[in-house]
Amino acid sequence: MDTTQARSNTIDQQIRPWGGLNYIANNALKDTPREKFVPEKYQNLAFADIEIPLSDKAKMLSPKIEGRLLNALNIKKDETVLEIGTGSGYLTAVISKLCKSITSIEIDEELSNSAQEKLDSLNVNNAQLEVGDASKGWNSNDFFDVVIVGSAVPKITGRYFHLLNVGGRIFVVEGTGNAMQAKLITRISEHKWETQSLFETHLDTMQGLETAESFKF
């Protein structure tokens, strides 16, 4: 497989037609070896328009979702990012090219360790990986300009809002079953938020929130 050409084809045939039009983000996607983050048994599907299984509970996002969320967030070089769900570490690696620093949280220690090895092999030095359950929120002494929630949540709540700087953005997929909406939430001021619906999609629900629709947060 000509991986360089495959990465370019993914941009042209999947990401751009589906609204991933951010030139800088697309270059970061093109320059990051997605194939190195895909489990060996799925190598032939590394650039397919699917979510690739990483474990019995985790999947890589499809390329077009990655492109669309990066397009919406428009991450700048001086911004800090919090990622909920490291997964393979691929999106972490891409985002590291776009931002000042990224902190990524993963509930599965084995996945986190594997992602760290891959990031180290690419000499990514502005990414900090942490192991923990962020399904109910996350405590941090830092504030972030961007928060990316890499799996679906039944309802948007304030569980990550307190971590966001004014002007910061959260990407999240909200909903249950087949009725899910990707949304961009921007912190306009200390107490004011703006929500923009981006597109309909479907992601697996975040671990720890699978039955959360029966609870109130």
Image (cartoon, grey):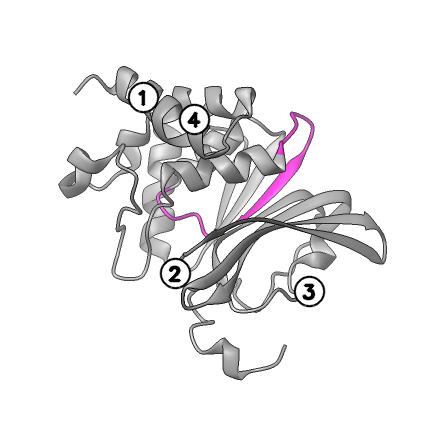
172 horizontally vs 108: left or right: right
3 horizontally vs 180: left or right: left
Could one spot residue 56 in this view of the protein? yes
Residue 120 on image: x %, y %? 39, 31
Write down the residue under mark 3: 158
Residue 212 on image: x %, y %? 50, 77
Counting other residues with Cα less than 10 Å from the Cα at mark 1, is it few (<14), some (14-19), or many (20 or more)?
some
The secondary structure type at the circle numbered 3 is loop
Q: Amino acid at mark 2?
A: Asp
Q: Earlier in the sequence, mark 2 or mark 3?
A: 3
Q: CA distance from mark 1 to mark 3?
A: 38 Å
- Marks 2 and 1: which is nearer the front? 1
Circle number at residue 29: 4
- Between 78 and 214, the one nearer to me in the picture: 214
- Marks 1 and 3: which is nearer the front? 1
The secondary structure type at the circle numbered 1 is helix
Q: Amino acid at mark 4?
A: Leu
Q: Amino acid at mark 1?
A: Asn
Q: Disc 1, disc 4: CB below 8 Å?
A: no
Specify the segment rendered in magenta. 74-88
The quarter of the picture where the C terminus appears is bottom right
Write down the residue under mark 2: 204
Write down the residue under mark 1: 9
Q: CA distance from mark 3 to mark 4?
A: 30 Å
Q: Main secondary structure of the magenta part?
A: loop
Residue 211 on image: x %, y %? 44, 78
- Marks 1 and 4: which is nearer the front? 1
Q: Earlier in the sequence, mark 1 or mark 3?
A: 1
Extreme residue in the bottom direction: 214
Counting other residues with Cα less than 10 Å from the Cα at mark 4, is it few (<14), some (14-19), or many (20 or more)?
many
Quadrant of res 71: top right
